[in-house]
Amino acid sequence: MTLTELKRLRWVVLAVVLACIFSSVAMNVLHAPDNVWARFVGALPPLAVFGCLELTARIPSSTRWLTIVRIVGATIVAGGAAYLSYFQQFAAIMDLGFPHDQALIWPGVIDGTMIVASVSLVEVIRKIRQMTASDQTPKVTRVDVRDVQFETQAQAYREAAQKLGIQQLQVPAAVNGSKSA
């Protein structure tokens, strides 16, 4: 995949994540008691997961230890949010009149899709970061003239320049040790 395709894919995956978060927030708020603060608290679990996702995906790793701490913390938040969100969504779906077996499945579908899309978003962002970093790394070709035996310094220069793809300079015959004509 090209960098342009990956950037386009990032927006598609982000749209899926946001749609799942919106669905989860709507279900959680739908089941919350009828006051503003209860609805605010009901909306927090999926928003907390999204916040952790963004922090995990967007901040480059500096040390392995800090990355592990960040991922473990995000996993704990996601686990707690999934627990809270699942039961709020289950109750909301039951209140809407769906059968019990469907009410058990729907929260898993919504939050499961959010998890898959979130992990996909992290992967796409990391792949974009890798491709961007490799584009900025200068390509260096090194030729060590000590590895090869040459009769003269001029011959070594010409062969090294040829390996590097440099146009050969016209070297006067007297410089390379031969007699001028």
Image (cartoon, rainbow, N blue to C red):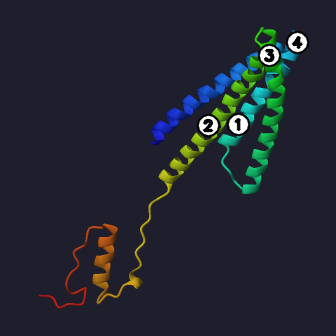
Residue farthest toward the left in the current orientation of the protein: 181
Q: Residue at x 50, y 33 (%)?
A: 8
Mark 1: amino acid: Leu
Q: Which residue is mark 4?
A: 33
Q: Which residue is mark 3?
A: 100
Q: Upstream in the sequence, badge 1 or badge 4?
A: 4
Give the number of the mark in front: 3 or 4.
3
- The correct choice, above or below, for 61 with respect to 114 in the image is below
- The correct choice, above or below, for 179 with respect to 15 in the image is below
Q: Position of residue 14 (x, y in %)?
A: 60, 30
Determine the CA span between mark 2 and mark 3. 32 Å
User: Tag on residue 53?
Assistant: 1
Q: Are marks 4 and 2 in contact (CB under 8 Å)?
A: no
Give the mark count. Answer: 4
Mark 2: amino acid: Leu
Q: Residue at x 69, y 20 (%)?
A: 22
Mark 4: amino acid: Pro
Please name whichever residue, 179 or 54, is drawn nearer the observer in this view of the structure.
54
Q: Upstream in the sequence, badge 4 or badge 2?
A: 4
Please name whichever residue, 43 or 177, is drawn nearer the observer in this view of the structure.
43
Query: Where the C terminus falls, by quadrant?
Result: bottom left
Determine the CA span between mark 2 and mark 1. 9 Å
Q: Position of residue 168 (x, y in %)?
A: 25, 71
Q: Are marks 2 and 1 in contact (CB under 8 Å)?
A: yes
Q: From the viewer's perspective, is 46 left or right of 155? A: right
